[in-house]
Image (cartoon, helix red, strand yellow):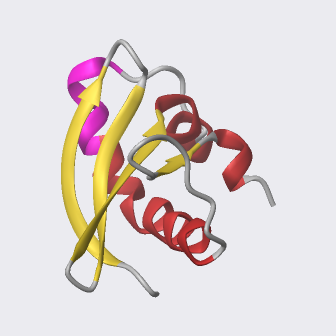
Amino acid sequence: MALTRGSFGSYEFDRMVVLFSMVDGEKEISCAVSTSAMDDLEKSERIKPDQREAQFKRLRDQIEERADQKFIAREFEGTPPGIVLRSLDFRK
């Protein structure tokens, strides 16, 4: 992996995403994964808001692997540039 594990940020109910970071050397890269993507990965029904951090931790390896792939492909979004993962990013 080009990136290394960063930190868990938070679950943002309004945006329905979990925020986290990855690290490229000394630089922290902002990342987000949609809750629908996590639900699809787990093949689960909607998870309660207070369970999103635990769900992220269960899926963290898969999420971070895909974030790394998008980083290598230079697929950044937003200002400042970051990585956003959606269900589409996990389809084979």
- For this view, does 90 lie left or right of residue 32? right
Residue 74 vs residue 68: left or right? right
Quarter residue 43 falls in? top right
Residue 38 position in % (x across, y down):
50, 41
Looking at the image, which residue sits at the far right? 92
Q: Quadrant of residue 90?
A: bottom right
- Look at 25% across and 73% down and name the residue there: 27
Is residue 49 found inside the magenta-colored segment of the image?
A: yes
Answer left or right for 27 relative to 68.
Answer: left
Residue at the image point whose x is 31% and y is 42% from the top: 19
Query: Quick check: is 5 in the magenta stretch?
Result: no
Q: Relative to 48, does residue 59 appear above or below in the rendering? A: below
Residue displayed at 55% across by 46% down = 77
The magenta span reads 48-54
Q: Residue 57: x percent and y percent? A: 29, 54
Task: State which quarter of the image contains the C terminus.
Answer: bottom right
